[in-house]
Amino acid sequence: MSGLLLAQTPPTVGELANQWNTNPHQGGLYLESALYQLVDAMGSSLTLPPWLVVAATLLVVCLLVFGFINVFGLFVVWLERKASAHIQCRYGPMEVGPHGVLQTIADGIKLTSKEDIVPRLADRPLFVLAPIIVFAGVLVRFVPLPFGQELVASDMDLGLFFVAAVGSVEVIGVILAGWSSNNKWSLFATMRTATQMVSYEIPLGLAFVSVIVCAGTFSLQEIIAQQEGWFWNWFILKNPFLLLMAPIYLVASLAECKRAPFDLPEAESELVSGFHTEYSGMRFAIFFLAEYAAMYLVSAIAVVLFFGGWWTGIPLIDGIGMGADASAGAAVTGFVIKAAVMVSKAVFLVFVQIWVRWTLPRVRLDQMMFICWKVLTPIALVCLVGATLWHLASGGGGLFGIPALLGLDG
Amino acid sequence: MPEVKTEEMLLNMGPQHPSTHGVFRVVIRTDGEMVLESESHIGYLHRCFEKVAENNNYLQVVPYTDRMDYLCAMANNLGYAQTVEKLMKLQVPERAEYIRVIVTELNRIASHLMAFGTYGMDLGAMTPFLYAFRDREMLLKIFEKLCGQRLNYSYIRVGGVTFDMTDEILADIERFCEYFEPDILKEYNDLLSYNGIFISRAANVGVLPVDLAISYGVTGPSLRGSGVARDLRKDEPSSIYDRFDFDVMVGSGEMGTVGDCWDRYMVRVREMTESVKIVRQAIRDIPSGPFCDKKAFRGVKPPKGEVYHKIEGARGEVGFYLVSDGTVKPYRVKARGPSFCNISVLDALTSKGDCMVADMVAIIGSLDIVMGEVDR
């Protein structure tokens, strides 16, 4: 940054953006590059220093993602309460708004207006820092995550790698929270979380790698683009080993999100509330929001990797607004459809997570480690090798590449 | 590099902990997730039942017995009432005997439903709990219709029962039996009992050998889970239990070792079927006639003497030892709560070094204690 500021001639915003972003996609609707284009178009009327513009742009993009997480959090907390209620022969929230849709807003207001308690013997700086780190660890993973075609905060060449790498930051926040609370039960939860999250990164990472091998790219945009066409072009149906990998990813992502049956770090019947037992008010709300944001995140990545991203799987619908000669109306319609498909697929997987949570009991720590190290990891390794060989043999065509092998695809 | 040292940690579980089923405290010495030793502390709910009973007349003691095992109050009422009747050599009307059996067995189902639901919750499954409460609610509504109370009935009294059981209530009970067995029990088994994760959590955990169980005085489903077919309804039937055809369920180590948590849990689930069987037979055979001994209702004055009487409650042997000095107040009442003996075995079960913190919860839940009865 300082090097840029000391340059003889100040760079334009576009140049600066190029330095920041390896793949700015100037022509697309990527949130970040779109904003740069806007700023460049305003051009001469702008008297602000370019670095400030870049910083402001990044802030705006960040707030957009943050806004999405908030709205999604409000919705999915309501969804979870309603779904769990109907699973359990109850109604769930019914009072605030029709069918209680505004209940989470009321709860949010309650949480923000609650007294913020820091235990007397807690390590105050770390206690305050912990929720911020946890939330930041989740938020930063949203950067390369597409919400629709060309609707992404910032595409990266190493998008998937970035997601896997910064995902581990969350663990630090959880450890800080448990440690600084000065509560033995929270400490238990902390150790469980650390073991769990570190272990489950392995099958999760192997799932990433096997898709990367088949797609030949780390970029989430590019991975989705390769799944165009009929739904048998989705990666889950391109390769039988990826079909096996998808459940592994889903199970591992449950553990990564600390959701039941792997909710050991929270385990309300054992550890009361786990690492956030001592948190109240807004800080608790941040942990809560981070959990739900992480749920969306792992689901959206599952959609990107295995379930065709924004493609509906029917070329007729996917083709709307795709050609160079498409009208502006068709282009907008296609854009909206793709965003809706992407988000609804992810929300469906979130619903599956909720469904599983309210059905199954919780596993024990040693059983959780057993599942990870002796079941998921070996199978994932075999799948990785298998997926690679199958990809080489079949050439990566749809429907496990069988039509291509048999010479049926013309 | 300096040697990394690990420390043992003393952990205070309770008295305010979601899985201790009341105000129960266990101090556990842990090495990581392993429990090395545990030490139970009780007494947080002590209400001097036995001393209070000495200052009330025989009939006034009944409501205090409700509050011992508040999940199966009928069995406590029954145990106390039969003890006083035994002392007085009082014969209650036949219809009252049948009504007593029906309500006690229904209350046993309600209590086992609670045990089933909370055990699921202890192991992290929230939904079975709500299912169990849905069905328990039906029973509580029946009791409410019968005596106006949902939990602390004081329905079974010395000399009979408080109110007669109307045909409408009998029809309600029959409807409940139709609804409950076998469909709902099958649903429970599909949802929880045979769930793979549940089995892996409960099987081979907290194995209670027969000799240990007997030496600690463990009774009820917890003892039967270890494979001992000891049921006072069968072995020493009080009142009319010998007229009914039912089986005593015992643990067989179906999913692991005999006497593990899964066996204890499953004995309760299967006992619900047997209780429904008894209720159906009782409804079929119930005679008409008076439902109480009116004279005894006005007040009793047993002769001098002492007596011990025990019945099979939902958690085991509910016993009362009564000393009478010939006045209207008992000279001494000693209650034997099954939960008290059952929980005493906890330290022996969890101090073997093979138990994890999560197993601690599973073992406490499988013993199915009610703190009101432990502390009295």
Image (spheres, rainbow, N blue to C red):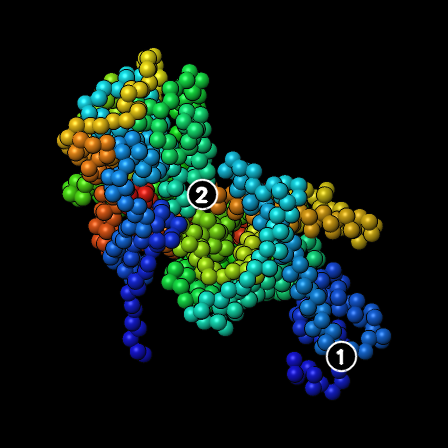
Residue A211's mark?
Answer: none
Question: Which residue is painted at 48% across and 51% down in the image?
Answer: A259
Question: Which residue is painted at 82% across and 75% down in the image?
Answer: A46
> Residue A14 in the image: x percent, y percent?
75, 73
- Whether residue A333 is visible to the viewer of this picture, yes or no, is yes
Looking at the rendered structure, whether the residues under marks 2 and 1 are on a common chain is answered as no
Q: Amino acid at mark 1?
A: Pro
Q: Residues within 10 Å of mark 2 (few under 14, many from 20)?
A: many
Residue A49's mark?
Answer: 1
Image quarter for residue A156?
Answer: bottom right
- In-front residue for pair B88/A151: B88
Against A241, is B282 above or below?
Answer: above
Q: Amino acid at mark 2?
A: Met
Against B320, is A293 above or below?
Answer: below
Image quarter for residue A181?
Answer: bottom left
Q: Residues within 10 Å of mark 1 (few under 14, many from 20)?
A: few
Against B84, is B198 above or below?
Answer: below
Q: What residue does disc 2 label?
A: B126
